[in-house]
Image (spheres, rainbow, N blue to C red):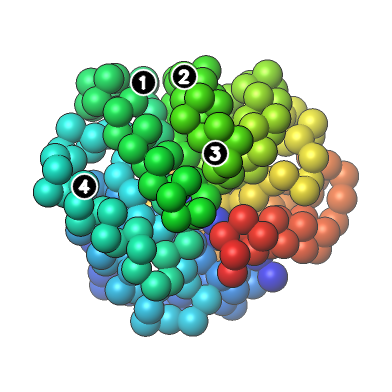
Amino acid sequence: MLIDSHAHIQGSEFSADVDQVIRRASEAGVEKIIIVGGAGDLSSNEAGLRLARSFPGLFATVGMHPHDAKDVGEEEWDKLRALVREPGVVAVGETGLDFYYEHAPRQTQVELFSRFIGIARETGLPLVVHSRRSDREVAELLCGEAKGSVGGVIHCFTGDYDAAREFLDLGFFLSFSGIVTFKNAEYLRDVVRKVPLDRILVETDAPYLAPVPHRGKRNEPAFLRLVADVVAGVKGISLEEVARSTSCNAQTLFGI
């Protein structure tokens, strides 16, 4: 069994065939999928929750991507706070900082991320954290705001081993995506080699970041095995061991 710890299959990219996408995932051994909200706008959270309630083995998170932090006013925040407490929500996020594109001002991102950390602390739910060109700032906020009382996962981790070690020391899991299959990602495979297996999750981030040989196409949870295969090869262990450990880690983190 594999668990896709981060996918956005509630979006328009899957509106025509989501049933088949979920079926193909099951046939490929992906028995559980975490549907992550907050990519694009507030409605992605509601859509993710509806989808999770429609199929067994699907679970939802509630958050807002840092790209869209500028669009979260008090009215939107009140809706997010209510949605987080809905039955079936297993995590807070996607949230975090993105200093690569900076679609929202840095300070606006920081303020929203801090509020989501607070809501995770209130509810006891884990965080699903986006960090791009911002590992140091994310770690500082988690250290200061979470105060050791909030755990979670750094999704689609692409940092170096120093950053990995800092997040591990804060009690977070690291999730690896199709990027580990890319030819130019040897540095990331080296990080995978060094990170303990009991702190690793695997994800697709579907519809984005399709692994080789599907790079450039729409990603979907059925491709997760390709990510797990690379993790297994890098660590010199079997795919079954990777599947067993990463699934156990995901079940522990999300309480599923």
User: Would residue 84 be found to the left or right of residue 196 on screen?
Assistant: left
SS assignment at label 2: helix
Q: Position of residue 209 (x, y in %)?
A: 46, 44
User: Which of the pair 2/150 is nearer the observer?
Assistant: 150
The image shows residue 95 at horizontal and vertical percentages of 38, 40
Residue wearing tag 1: 99
Q: Quadrant of the C terminus?
A: bottom right
The residue pinned by badge 4 equals 77
- Labelled pair 3, 4 in contact (Cβ < 8 Å): no
| Mark 2 vs mark 4, CA separation in Å | 23 Å
Which residue is identified by label 3?
A: 154
Quarter of the rendering containing residue 163: top right
Which tag is nearer the camera, tag 3 or tag 4? Answer: 4
State which quadrant residue 185 falls in: top right
Asked if labels 1 and 3 touch by Cβ distance under 8 angstroms, the answer is: no
CA gap, disc 3 and disc 2: 13 Å
Indicate the quadrant containing the N terminus: top left, top right, bottom left or bottom right: bottom right
Q: Quadrant of residue 67?
A: top left
**Mark 3: secondary structure:** strand
Choose the circle earlier in sequence order: 2 or 1: 1
Q: Residues within 10 Å of mark 1 (few under 14, many from 20)?
A: some
Numbered badge on residue 137: 2
Amino acid at the residue labelled 1: Phe
1 and 4 marks in contact (CB < 8 Å): no
User: Decide: marks 2, 1 in contact (CB < 8 A)?
Assistant: yes
Name which of mark 1 and mark 4 comes first in the sequence: 4
| Residue type highlighted by circle 4 | Trp
Q: Which residue occupies 74% across, 28% down?
A: 190
Horizontal placement of 208 versus 68: left or right? right
Q: CA distance from mark 2 to mark 1?
A: 10 Å
Using the image as rendered, state which of residue 87 and residue 63 is in the foreground: 87
The disc, 2 or 4, on the residue closer to the chain's N-terminal end is 4
